[in-house]
Amino acid sequence: MTKPPVVHSKIIVLAACLLLYPLVFSDAFYRDIGVTFLLAAISASAWNIVGGYAGQVSVGHSMFYGIGAYAPLLFYQHFGWPPIAGIPIGIASSIALAVLIGAPTFRLTGHYFSMATIAVAELIRIFTGTWEFAGAAIGLQGPAVARGWWDLTFRGELPYYYIFLGVLAILLYVTYAIEQRRFGYYLRAIKAGERAARSLGAPVRETKIKALVLSATFTSVAGSLYSIKTGFIDPESGFGILVSVQMVIIAALGGAGTLFGPLVGALILIPLQTATNTWFGGSGSGLTYILYGGIIVLIARFEPGGLFELWDRIAPARWKRSHAA
Amino acid sequence: MLLDAQNVSKAFGDFLAVSGADLSIDEGEIIGLIGPNGAGKSTFFNCLAGDATPTSGKITFAGQEVTNASPETHARLGIGRTFQVPATFEDMTVLDNVMVGAFLRHPHRNEAREHARGIVELTGLNPVAHLRARSLGTPGRKRLEIARVLATNPRLMLLDESLAGLTPTELQEAIRLVRRIHEMGITIVIVEHIMEVIMTLTRRVLVFNQGHVIASGKPEDVVRDETVITAYLGHGHQRRRGDP
Amino acid sequence: MLLLQVIVGGLLLGAIYALFSSGLTLIWGMMNFINFAHGEFVMLGMYVALLAVVWLGGGPAVFGFAAAVALFILGVVVYAGLIRHVMRGPMIAQILSTFGLALLLRYTAFFIFSANFVSLPQTSLSGTVNVGGILMPLAQLVSGVLAVALTIGLHFMLTRTAIGSKLLAVSEDRNAAMLMGIRPNRMQALAWGLSAGAGGIAGALMAISYPWSPSVGETFGLTAFVVVALGGFGSVPGALYAGLIVGLIQAVSAYWLGPIYKDIVVYALFVALLWLRPQGLMGKA
């Protein structure tokens, strides 16, 4: 599946736009949206690996995000470590949790996995709210003033933007590499028909667990980036259901199971979310989630493949042929 | 002996779908499984393929016991199967479908793709290689399933009504394909209702009824067997034949 | 004595859990479909009860009936407008459909009713009774007993009546049922109506005794998962036993460990079940 030259040039244009964006739009407001967009794109792309490609719909992915978000601040708060040191610990814990959940539930039908993800995420959220060591309901804070560059406490948005962009680029590259390899084919086969995939020798359970582990890793990193940048975390912003929902809706809107779907979804939803929050003020967040719920239902009902699928269906055949392989 | 199924029974709760079925297949044979609907042949077939675990009995393949083995293990050992209702990967292209099969023996993409291309050519799917499986009709899907399984380099291929619902021309083509596969040295077991397929392709036939194997032998002998005719047509037929 | 009271209270609440969970298990058993919005059906039942009291006056019989009917209709509408279309599609569509619906219902309720906790005005079922030395609110006693009766009634309806066997026929084998002249679509719509209706009545029963806000839907939804997992997916009798057990465990945990642990224990039980016995106490995997 070699990509024809016309797609390569699109990627270059995209990369250029992303690189230049904060330099062109240098106002703090725009840079902040940019950083939020990148973070959302990273989380959704991470979810995409197991939810989009493999079709194992996690609706509690915040559990990995939250672990990744708490780890850096926990180790800063209690041991004075630079928050960045908590990132690998967050990853390791998330991987352990992923295996713990995946191993039993992937033996059963897809519904069990989805239910388990909600239950575990809620369990962790409530528990963290009672755990003094993690700040209970109040949460944890990061360094207010940087002790050195390693604390990653920048005053402006710009350094964060490029760090996040780098992580996104790595994640997208990893996803692309998976798409090309046997692992990626098996993921798609599992989504398309587990029974048939099994009959062809695909190690279904193993593959699903690997996908979940990979997804959990990057989701954890996204959480870490969030708490390091924000300098704050609490049970709701780490493990809340809305964290999980946002990942799912962004990936599903753009196109779950496609490489750039989550990016497209984030491109649409983050500005939209910022706008509704600004327009409606305090009640804005309520309306935003009504909107999210509605969008998810519409996607499920009419176009589960998201915008990419929609484009595939309605784009005039002539345009497609002239751009096809 | 390539496959040896001994005294295989499969019960679903109180219902005994298969009871004491035996089947021994030598490498290179081409066997038919026939019988009325609900006779247990599909369940038996699923046991051979690893999709169902026998309640009792033993199945051995190439010397290894596979009675309780998973479908993945079956595939790796060299047993491949198609599905009665085609289970192609709808959103993937025909070539990608076959590649999933090819990846079993060829872990690297380029080799898998080469191998898959060869299979696509062999099975006459070249014209639709880059179309999504969902745009194929049922005959296309059935052929795709055969190609996909073939790509796993099976020693034994279990075809579950893979030739049903075809026009006469398509049927002839499919029969030719199965024959070509057989000539490649692959042992084949076919579940079928179409007599022409059984008569022209198979050398040995097993007849199921109500969970038991009621007859086995050469196709031309089996179709003339009294018990087989009664099983299909009912006792009324038998009574008529006895009338003066 | 106090412990005994806690136990009885837990069982009575558990009976209501059993009632709404039986709706969830009915859908699972029939269609292999998990309704992530089921908790919201219960929550809406509570608000319908409130609105019925405010608009129509009347006691538990009135608002209970109103909740049942309103949610029955909602269940059928949800089936016809959404579920029917995603049922046979990809898993992601199935799961997202009711998950999105849950969000939609929950946040619409937040928008309309605000996040404040509300409760029903005093009903004719006020006051406490003394049963064998145990004091309990009359409302809780009546609700609990009624919930058990309704759950058993649902089970009898499914297993002993003609319409029940039609429902079961569709769940066994859709195509065979069609050949017998049963219309699967109608039966499935009916099942969704019953499921939501059960949730609605359960909500109304709970509203008599407990305050609530739109946030309770999420908790009830998860509770229903636990009950259904414990009782066995598809088994209404299982939901009855499991509901009582969950109510009991919850009450005793709150008593011994503190009220915060009320939910933690239930979710932890669910997670433990997934590992150890996914098919529950009585059901098939």
Image (cartoon, rainbow, N blue to C red):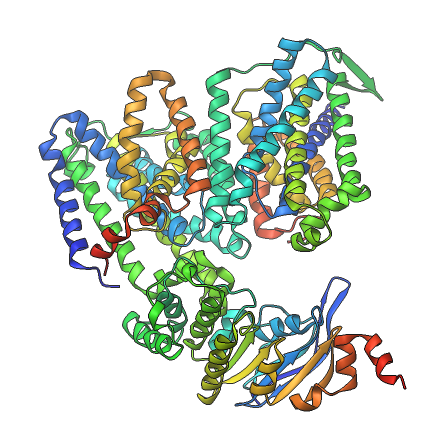
Q: Is residue B168 above or below residue A188?
A: below
* Residue A241 x %, y %: 43, 34
**Residue depicted at x 35% and y 37%:** A70
Task: Report if residue C261 is visible in the image.
Answer: no
* Residue B11 x %, y %: 72, 67
Q: On the rendered structure, is C126 left or right of A315?
A: right
**Residue depicted at x 54% and y 46%:** C87
**Residue depicted at x 39% and y 40%:** A248
Q: Is residue B212 above or below residue A271?
A: below
Q: Say which quadrant the N terminus of chain A sits in.
A: bottom left
Q: Say which quadrant the C terminus of chain A sits in.
A: bottom left
Q: On the rendered structure, is B169 left or right of B16?
A: left
Front one among B212 and C21? B212
Q: Residue furthest toward the front?
A: B244
Task: Report if residue A30 is visible in the image.
Answer: yes
Front one among C230 and A260? A260
